[in-house]
Amino acid sequence: GLSMMTRLLSGMGLGKQFSLYILHTKRLFSAMQSCSGRQVVVDSSKLPGRAMAVAQIPGIDMRVIHLVRDGRGVAWSLLKGYERDAKSGLQKEIKPKSVFRTALRWSMVNLAVEYLSRKLGSEKVMRVRYEDFASDPVAVMQQIGTFLELDLSQVGTSLQNGEAMGPGHQVAGNRLRMNASIALNKDETWRTRMPARQQVSFQRLGGWMLRRYGYL
C-alpha cells in the first residue's frame, strides 16, 4: 500500500523481497492470461503502492484508472459498521470509521495517485469521477475504452440500460462479489442524510482536494 509506495519513491528499494514479488506477480498474471485467453488483466486492488510496484515490472504495459468519489460520500459510507458474516462475504467485522480518519486517508490516497501520475506520465493514468460514471456510463466507458484501446461500448450500453452484470471471480474484496448479479446505481444518499456538521468536518481537512476534483 502506501508504505510500499513510500519506499519505492524514496529510492530505498525492496531488495530480495521485491524480486520475489516481481516473480510471483508475473507468474500470476501469466497464469490468468493463459487460463482466460484474455490479453488484459484488471487489477482492482485499489492501492497506489501496488500500482507503483507493478509499474516497476518489465514487460507489463500498465494503465491506471483513478476512480475518485466525493469524499463526503465515502465518509458517509464508512460511518456504517458491519458484523462479520463469512457467508455474505464479510470475512471480518467492519467497524465505523470517523469522518476525520476518512478525510485524512481519502486525501492521502488521492494525493499518492496524483504523485503516481506524475511519475508514470499522464498518458498512463486516467481519472474518472464515480458520479460521472454512474450518471452517464456510455460516455465514460467510451472514454475508458479509448484510453485502454478497447471497445467497451457494449459494456457502457448495458450499464446505461440497467442490465445486471456478473461480478466475475474475486478471491476477496467487496461483499457484493457474493451477489449473483450487480447493476449500476448512483448512490448520493449522503447529500440528504449526512449531518451538515459531519460534511463541514470533512471539508475542513479534505476541502482542497474536493475543490481539485470539482466537488466544491
Image: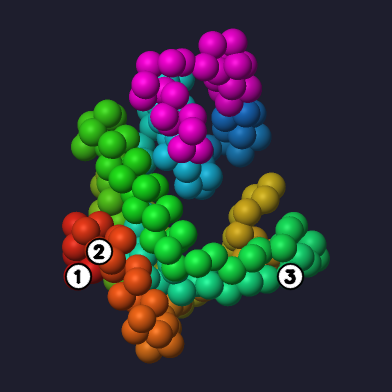
Quick one: 74 or 200, which is closer to the camera? 200
Q: Determine whether, in the image, residue 77 is placed left or right of residue 64.
A: right
**Which residue is nearer to you in this view: 72 or 187?**
72
Q: Earlier in the sequence, mark 2 or mark 1?
A: 2
- On residue 207, which mark appears? 2
Q: Secondary structure at mark 3?
A: loop
Q: Position of residue 22 (x, y in %)?
A: 55, 19
Residues under labels 2 and 3: Cα distance? 31 Å
Amino acid type at image mark 2: Gly
Q: Which amino acid, mark 3?
A: Glu
Q: Residue furthest top?
A: 16
Residue of label 3: 83
Q: Quadrant of residue 67?
A: bottom left
Q: Nearer the viewer, mark 2 or mark 3?
A: 2
Q: Which residue is mark 1?
A: 216
For the stretch drawn in magenta, the main secondary structure is helix
Tell me how the rendering is colored. Answer: rainbow
Marks 3 and 1 in Cβ contact (< 8 Å): no
Q: Residue 177, can we see it?
A: yes
Q: Are marks 2 and 1 in contact (CB under 8 Å)?
A: yes
